[in-house]
């Protein structure tokens, strides 16, 4: 479901050059759910994630009008979109927090046999540095390839991998500590 | 206990159901479509955030799917038109004047836009020959191209291509048939019964 599919990307890029509005719609359909999911973990409120998920594509659409075909053909779509989305997430993170992170609206499906504990994961992720949280969420929640994470964060591969492994270590520690309580 | 990686991969949340639609339409990349009742029966109308992009009477396009196919812009079905837009359209159809209505012709060529903009100035009760539009555009020999552009009018009835006739006085062509064109012109008082 989340597998990075190169042929999807090619088709979207081709359509963007021949029919911008149709290509854009395909872009939204393919990438907006992932941007929304990632933004949910990187911002505090679901309204923020919705705004990020919408504004990312608004900015992308405007940017595309200035790109020639060659530039579009060379675009790494997820990396490019996440560059925009991370900027938007950062803007929101700097706003004053009026609610505690981790208070979610009823997004948990109560019909799941093992309900997903979004609150606990928000809390654990909040214990990571911004860079670690971003890298871990992009890699393991959004399933972005490392190369796209590098494009989106502007950080080199070695650093991104370190952020991910250190972030995961901290999360494992947090889970273990909770189990001991 | 699942690994941390596995649990993280399950933190997927579906976006709100209308998010795609509001993103695409909000960016200006797509339209909303719905229907409105009028004295011509039910009309399909498409609109972008800029203005009306398309109109087709249901008698010419029985299903929403056929309208969207013909419309050729990314389209999302809305439950209804915004109240103000519906009111403006119904008024315009009653009065024969589309002043104040906003159209979005950005998907058309510059020439087509100019033809339709000139056509939109023809007042109710009047007719003009195709050549008149060509002259308005400073392209007196483009009469045939004007005809083709009018034949592709995406917003008939509101952009009154039915008020454009042949210079010999005959009614000329119309997307919904010459008889409807004639009836429209009679009801507008532009020609006698």
Image (cartoon, rainbow, N blue to C red):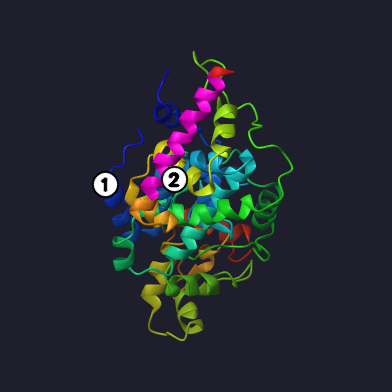
Residue A140 found in image quarter: top left
* SS class, disc 2: helix
Q: Tag 1 or tag 2, which sits nearer the N-term?
A: 1
Residue B178 found in image quarter: bottom left
**Depth check, front residue: A140 or B98:** A140
Residue placed under numbered mark 2 in the picture:
A135
Question: Which residue reaches farthest right?
Answer: A98
Residue A100 in the image, given as x and y percentages of width and height:
69, 37
Residue B79 found in image quarter: top right
Question: Which residue reaches farthest left?
Answer: A7
Whether residue B121 is situated above or below residue A147 in the rendered picture: below
Whether residue B87 is situated above or below residue B102 in the rendered picture: above
Tell me, yes or no, whether the highlighted magenta stretch contains residue A177: yes
What is the quadrant of the C terminus of chain A in the image?
top right
Q: CA distance from mark 2 to mark 1?
A: 21 Å
Image: magenta residue range: A160-179
- Residue A6's disc is 1
Label 1 packing within 10 angstroms: few (<14), some (14-19), many (20+): few
Evaluate if marks 2 and 1 touch, with contact meaning CB atoms under 8 Å apart: no
**Depth check, front residue: B93 or A17:** A17
Q: Main secondary structure of the magenta part?
A: helix
């Amino acid at each position: 479901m989340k597998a990075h599919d190169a042929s999807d990307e090619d088709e979207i890029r081709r359509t963007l050059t021949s029919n911008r509005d149709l290509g854009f719609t395909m872009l939204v359909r393919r990438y907006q759910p992932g941007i929304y999911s990632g933004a949910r973990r990187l911002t505090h409120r679901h309204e923020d994630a919705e705004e990020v998920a919408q504004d990312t594509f608004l900015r992308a659409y405007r940017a595309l009008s200035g790109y020639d075909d060659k530039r579009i053909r060379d675009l790494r779509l997820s990396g490019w979109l996440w560059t925009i989305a991370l900027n938007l997430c950062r803007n929101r993170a700097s706003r004053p927090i009026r609610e505690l992170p981790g208070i979610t609206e009823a997004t948990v499906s109560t019909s799941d046999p093992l309900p997903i504990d979004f609150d606990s994961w928000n809390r654990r992720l909040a214990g990571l540095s911004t860079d670690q949280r971003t890298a871990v969420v992009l890699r393991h929640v959004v399933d972005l390839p490392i190369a796209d994470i590098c494009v989106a964060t502007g950080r080199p591969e070695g650093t991104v991998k370190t952020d991910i492994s250190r972030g995961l270590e901290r999360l494992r520690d947090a889970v273990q500590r909770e189990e001991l309580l | 206990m699942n690994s941390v990686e596995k649990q993280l991969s399950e933190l997927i949340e579906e976006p709100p159901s209308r998010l795609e639609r509001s993103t695409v339409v909000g960016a200006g990349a797509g339209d909303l479509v719905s229907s409105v009742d009028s004295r011509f029966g039910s009309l399909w109308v498409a609109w972008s955030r800029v203005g009306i992009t398309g109109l087709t009477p249901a008698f010419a396009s029985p299903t929403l799917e056929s309208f969207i196919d013909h419309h050729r812009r990314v389209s999302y079905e809305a439950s209804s038109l915004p109240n103000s837009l519906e009111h403006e359209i119904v008024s315009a159809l009653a009065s024969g004047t589309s002043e104040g209505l906003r159209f979005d012709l950005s998907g058309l060529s510059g020439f087509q836009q100019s033809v339709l903009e000139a056509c939109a100035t023809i007042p109710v009760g009047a007719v003009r020959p195709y050549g008149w539009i060509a002259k308005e555009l400073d392209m007196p020999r483009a009469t045939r191209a004007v005809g083709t552009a009018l034949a592709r009018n995406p917003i008939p009835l509101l952009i009154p291509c039915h008020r454009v006739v042949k210079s010999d006085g005959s009614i000329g062509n119309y997307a919904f048939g010459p008889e409807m064109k004639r009836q429209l012109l009679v009801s507008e008082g532009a020609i006698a019964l």
